[in-house]
Amino acid sequence: MRAMLVVVLLVLASVGCGAPAGPDAAANGGSEAGKVAAPAGPDPAKLQSALADPLRPEEDRARDADRKPAEVLAFFGIAEGMRVADLQATGGFYTELLSSAVGGDGMVYAQNNAFVLARFAEEPLTTRLTRLSDAGRRNIERIDAELDEMELPADLDAAILVRFYHDLFWLPTPDGDQADRAEFLRRVHDALRPGGVFGIIDHHAEEGSGARDALDPREGLHRIDAELVRQEVLAAGFELAGESDLLANPDDTRDWNIFADGAVRRDKTDRFVFKFVKPR
Ligand SMILES: C[S@@+](CC[C@H](N)C(=O)[O-])C[C@H]1O[C@@H](n2cnc3c(N)ncnc32)[C@H](O)[C@@H]1O
């Protein structure tokens, strides 16, 4: 009996601290955390119901089948009450879902840098946040800051960087330089609590290609070699807690620009999903 209690407590402790649930479990739409029904663990049913929120725009819903956001957030261990940063949120597809997932006791920080705000994000993000605020959502805060200068709140439970790591190799700061990636990673690492999750999704480039295809969309393919991302994030002091094939597409030849054809195929790429954690 006593041994069982210890096991239960250990499971609850690992869930509460966002310890790696097996990637396969989460990829199957569930997670070890979900199975023990711990209040602090991800609840796959609740995450799925966030997709059906009537507030969500039709344009977002149309992307769910290819982006599988409920499964992705379960894999990252996102749960009610958490404080999560959506890094380079752009128009806020994930910001809105995170806001539903963490609920009124949680908080979402939607960060964007000046270039992305000016080119892509200002109007759609403002429209989205106004709509949510008008509907009574109070758990989203906007952070407009460069990646290597941003001041994130302390003790975050998670941070996600979705389809953006490749942009770190060309996107200019207001000074005309690229953001300092090591400094960016240091800031994410500092902001997370021990055991906090750093989830990264991006479009696969050809294996072994490094940053070759991670250029401005006019010149490159908007893709990145997963191994380069893994090495840089590990070098910043994170541990790899899991990798998911949720967004894998073996038919993707990885040799086309994801914004080709007016972006109609942008959600059809072969994508890697890494779950890093800040060691305890
Ligand atoms: C694809 S967004 C990712 C946004 C957000 N994290 C998400 O998952 O929805 C990241 C980058 O895509 C690029 N981008 C966005 N819209 C674009 C467009 N219409 N044409 C070319 N590039 C675009 C920008 O470089 C932007 O910073």
Image (cartoon, helix red, strand yellow):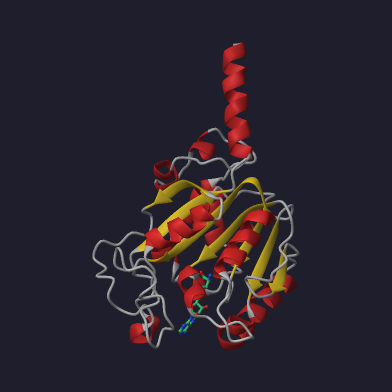
* Side of 58 where 251 appears, left or right: left
Q: Position of residue 110 (x, y in %)?
A: 65, 68
Is 108 located above or below residue 258 in the figure? above
Q: Is residue 137 visible?
A: yes
- Judging depth in this view, the residue of 133 and 176 nearest the camera is 176
Q: Position of residue 169 (x, y in %)?
A: 48, 75
Q: Position of residue 274 (x, y in %)?
A: 45, 54
- Judging depth in this view, the residue of 70 and 245 nearest the camera is 245
**Residue drawn at x 44%, y 56% as measured from the top left:** 230
**Residue drawn at x 39%, y 71% as measured from the top left:** 211
Is 275 located above or below residue 263 in the figure? above
Task: Please give the count of numbered marks on the rendered protein.
Answer: 0
* Side of 119 where 274 appears, left or right: left
Q: Is residue 69 visible?
A: no
Furthest residue in direction top, as rendered: 1
- The C terminus sits in image quarter: top right
Q: Position of residue 159 (x, y in %)?
A: 60, 58
- Judging depth in this view, the residue of 163 and 234 nearest the camera is 234
- The N terminus sits in image quarter: top right
**Residue drawn at x 73%, y 62% as measured from the top left:** 139
